[in-house]
Amino acid sequence: MLGIIGGSGLYDIQGLKIVEEVEVSTPFGEPSDKYVIAEYKGKKAVFLPRHGKGHKYPPHLINYRANIWGFRKLGVNKILSVSAVGGINPLLKPGDFVLSDNFIDFTKSRVSTFYEGLNSKEDDTGINDQVKEYLKDKRVVHIDVTNPFCPSMRKLLKDICEEKGYRYHFKGCYVATEGPRLETAAEIKMLSLLGGDVVGMTLVPEIILARELNMHFASVNIVTNLAAGISEERLTSDEVIQTMKQKTEDIKKVILEFIEKVPEKLNCSCEEVLKGAAI
C-alpha cells in the first residue's frame, strides 16, 4: 500500500474518497497526526501531514520515527513524500517540480535510525520480517544509501509530469538542513559548490527511516523560491505558501495519477536493502 507524506491540503482532492482517520500508537511516541485512509479508483492510500494539521511541528521537532513506523503498522510499503524546497541550482524556477535522485544531510539533532543495538525498541506490528528479527536481536544496522530513491517510483513520476506537460527536473540533489531558520547566503554558496540543487528541512531522516523498513521511497519537491543569495529579495514564508497554493491543483493531479498507476510490485531492489546490513 502507498503512504503519502505532505500537508493537510492534499485531502480535499476531487474524486478521492476518505474511508477513515485512524490514530496509531508507536514505540517511538505519537505521530504528527491521525493517518487518513483514502481510496481512488479502487486503490488505497494513506495520508499523513508531516507537520500535523495546522502546521504544529517545526521541522526539527517532527517525530519522524513515529511517523514512518505508523505507516508500517498500517501496511504501507511505499512512501511518496511531497515538500516545498528552495532552489539552489540557477536552472530551477519557482513552481518547478524536482524529482530528487540523491541527498546531502546537514541536519544536526535528529534520530535517524530504528536500530539502536541494545537500546532498540520491540516491534509491535505483528509483522514477521527482517525488521522484526533485527530489532529483536538488538542488531546494529548500516544500510546502503548509494541510490536512496526508488527508481521505479521516480520513473512513474517522470512519466506523469511529462504526460501532463509540467515543468520538471528528473535529477536533483536535495540538501537537508536543520532549520527552522532559513540558510545564510554563505551556506547556500557552500551547498552549491557541494552539488546541491534544492534545499529543504524534512527529507532527512524520513527517507533513511523508510529504507530501514524496506520501504520504497520517492520525493516530489516543489521549488517555491530561490535560496538565500540567489534570490535578490528577502526570503519569507509568505512566498512559500503562495507558490504552494498556485501549484496545489498540479500537485493533486500528480498524486491522483500516482495512486492509480503505481503497481503493487515494483521492479527494483529497494526491499533488499537490509540484506547483509546488520552486524
Image: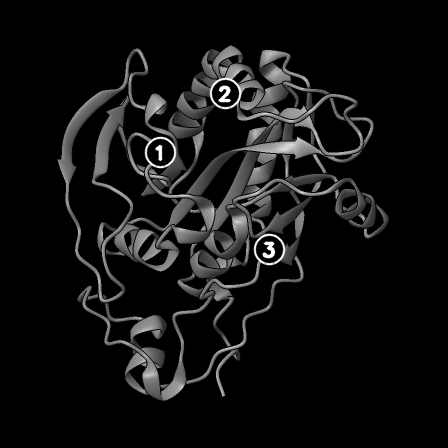
Amino acid carrying label 1: it is His
Q: Earlier in the sequence, mark 3 or mark 1?
A: 1
Residue 42, can we see it? Answer: no
Q: Earlier in the sequence, mark 2 or mark 3?
A: 3
Q: Which residue is mark 3?
A: 148
Residue 28, can we see it? Answer: yes
Q: Relative to 62, is 148 on the left or the right?
A: right
Q: Residues within 10 Å of mark 3 (few under 14, many from 20)?
A: many
User: Which structural element holds mark 3?
Assistant: loop
Q: Which residue is mark 1?
A: 55
| Residue 200, image x, y percentages | 59, 41
Structural distance between the alpha carbons of marks 2 and 3: 28 Å
User: Which structural element holds mark 2?
Assistant: helix
Q: Which residue is mark 2?
A: 241
Q: Residues within 10 Å of mark 2 (few under 14, many from 20)?
A: few
Amino acid carrying label 3: it is Pro
